[in-house]
Image (cartoon, grey):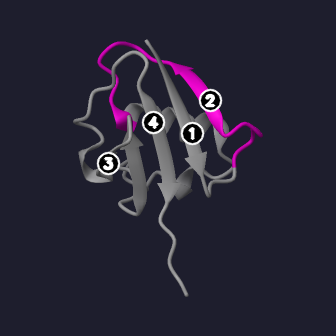
Amino acid sequence: MKVSISYFGISAKVDEKLTCFTLSEQSSVKDLVTQFAFNFLYDPDILIGKEGSLHRHLIIHVNKKRVLASKAADHILNDGDEVAIYLSVSGG
């Protein structure tokens, strides 16, 4: 299946802000984010913790609906889904 991923506030090895991924059926949001982090980011640790879970500060949307990082392994993707990843921002 094919899904698209867009990302914001993340330094990646590619210039495009929208990337298409081919994943196996029954892949989860966590599978996609992990594959993206290890294949396209200079520092995968910005998204993935030492124990392999997604950092809870991530903001993830699938088809414009919020998916909590803690629930990403349970959210199964479908062909054509659009996933957006943001880093939460703080400060003032």
User: Disc 2 and disc 1: Cα gap in Å?
Assistant: 6 Å
* Residue under pointer 4: 83
- In the rendered structure, which amino acid carries the disc numbered 4? Val
Please state which amino acid type lies under the numbered disc 2.
Thr
Indicate which disc, 2 or 1, sits on the residue closer to the N terminus. Answer: 1
Residue at figure coordinates x 43%, y 12% from the top left? 1
Q: In this view, does 56 lie to the left or right of 89?
A: left
- Percent across and percent down for residue 64 are 38, 41
- Ranked by sequence position, the earlier of labels 4 and 3 is 3
Q: Residue type at mark 1: give it.
A: Ser
Mark 4 residue element: strand
Q: In which quarter of the image is the C terminus?
A: bottom right
Query: Of the numbered discs in the image, which one, if any, rests on residue 19?
Result: 2
Seen at 40% across and 13% down, the residue is: 24
Q: Pointer 1: what residue?
A: 6
Q: Assign a secondary structure to mark 3.
A: strand
Identify the magenta region.
12-30
Q: Name the residue under label 3.
A: 66
Distance between the Cα atoms at labels 2 and 3? 19 Å
The answer to whether the residue labelled 4 contacts the one labelled 3, judged by CB atoms less than 8 Å apart, is no
Disc 1 from disc 3: Cα separation? 14 Å
Circle 1 SS class: strand
> Label 3 sits on what residue type?
Arg
Q: Is mark 2 on a helix, strand or loop?
A: strand
Q: Which of marks 2 and 4 is nearer the N terminus?
A: 2
- Say left or right for 8 vs 64: right
Q: Give neighbour class at mark 3: few <14, some 14-19, many 20+ (Cα, 10 Å).
A: few
